[in-house]
Amino acid sequence: MAMSRIALLPSVTEKVADKSIMDVGDEIKKIVKDHGGTFLRIQLVVVLPITALMMFSDHIFQNFAISHLPVPTPHPLADTESIVTFTFGRLSPPAQMFRHLLLACQTSQVLQTLTAAIAIGWLNLYMSLHCIAANIYAVVSFHNGKNLAFMDVLHAVPKLRSRLIVTGYWGYLFTFAASLPLLLYDVMSWSKVPAYVFVVFGIVIAAVCFVVSFFTSPIFQVANCIACCEEKTGLASFLRCFNLFDRTLLLKASFPLELFLRGLGSGAYTVLGGIRMGPMSYGFTVVAELMIYSLLTQLSIVCWTFVYIWSKEYREESVDMIVFPDDQFRGPFQRIGTGGQSARDVEIGGLEGSN
């Protein structure tokens, strides 16, 4: 059996090495065609409401910051918003909160701002884990040939959430670290420095963050997949992520995929910004932005889950080696032995033994 397993490696390697962004589209079309109803329910019941709550909590924090904190006058040549839009789309939530804390240091509102930032940041992280867990669970399950009902997905989410939350804390830390150059540029814009500093430093920041940001999303999403599927949480999931990615796969699939997702989002928001509907414009814009953001969130998770599946196939021959236990729930997925039986031929049990 060992010889036959080794013999499979070249064909599997060739199969995965040829993957491209077009294969992502083919996989999504196939899975939506067969299980579109489940993903629609995940969108309407999980992703959309949670996205609305996260947008509302961010809005509350922004209003609190605007009403309680000073608004410094930036340097005429400093354009933080343009750099943020060009690189990250918007400043990450951890970086936004840290920026407000810097402003709060000029007032007596430090404790209030810190409390609000921690509370809302933790709440948004906790809510987002449900979206991530539901979609990863559904994609890998359907890829393994298991027909899930929507309620099966909901039952599995709490168990995945407990793993994802530790990985999420590390993700917030890494996102904040990646945003530090932008925060430094933002702080510099409040001070009196020569004009050429903003020009040179702004170009460097934009270039560096633009490149780095293209790899943060796949790394975070694949780390979430590892936390769900391999029960490696926290920093271990990120270390496993770096070992799992193949350079060819990362460049051929991840970079074009991130470029496509960003282009799709930018195009949608550009079209939305050009629509005017008179007195209904504000309400329409809010609803449309919510729909776009929630759909892009689900699409992004689904896409990167397929990249994870391919990287696993490349490293470990086949994702078919991950199946559901039929006797107890030791996790959403469990490796089987090296017998001749394929995972698609294994009887997959339910979640009754999960408690």
Image: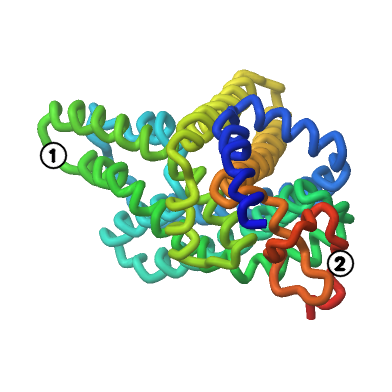
The circle drawn on residue 349 is 2
Q: Mark 2 packing: few (<14 Cα in 10 Å), some, or many (20+)?
A: some
Q: Earlier in the sequence, mark 1 or mark 2?
A: 1
Marks 1 and 2: which is nearer the front? 2
Q: Position of residue 349 (x, y in %)?
A: 86, 66
Quarter of the figure that contains the C terminus: bottom right
Residue in the picture at 48% in, 66% down: 234
Q: Amino acid at mark 1?
A: Lys
Residue in the picture at 34% in, 66% down: 110
Q: Does any portion of residue 290 appear in the rendered image?
A: no
Q: Position of residue 15 (x, y in %)?
A: 62, 33
Q: Nearer the viewer, residue 43 or 233?
A: 233
Q: Amino acid at mark 2?
A: Gly
Q: Nearer the viewer, residue 36 or 21?
A: 21
C-alpha span from label 1 to label 2: 66 Å
Quarter of the figure that contains the N terminus: bottom right
Residue in the picture at 58% in, 31% down: 261
Q: Residue furthest bottom?
A: 355
Q: Is residue 43 left or right of residue 74?
A: right
Task: State the SS at label 2.
Answer: loop
Label 1 sits on residue: 192
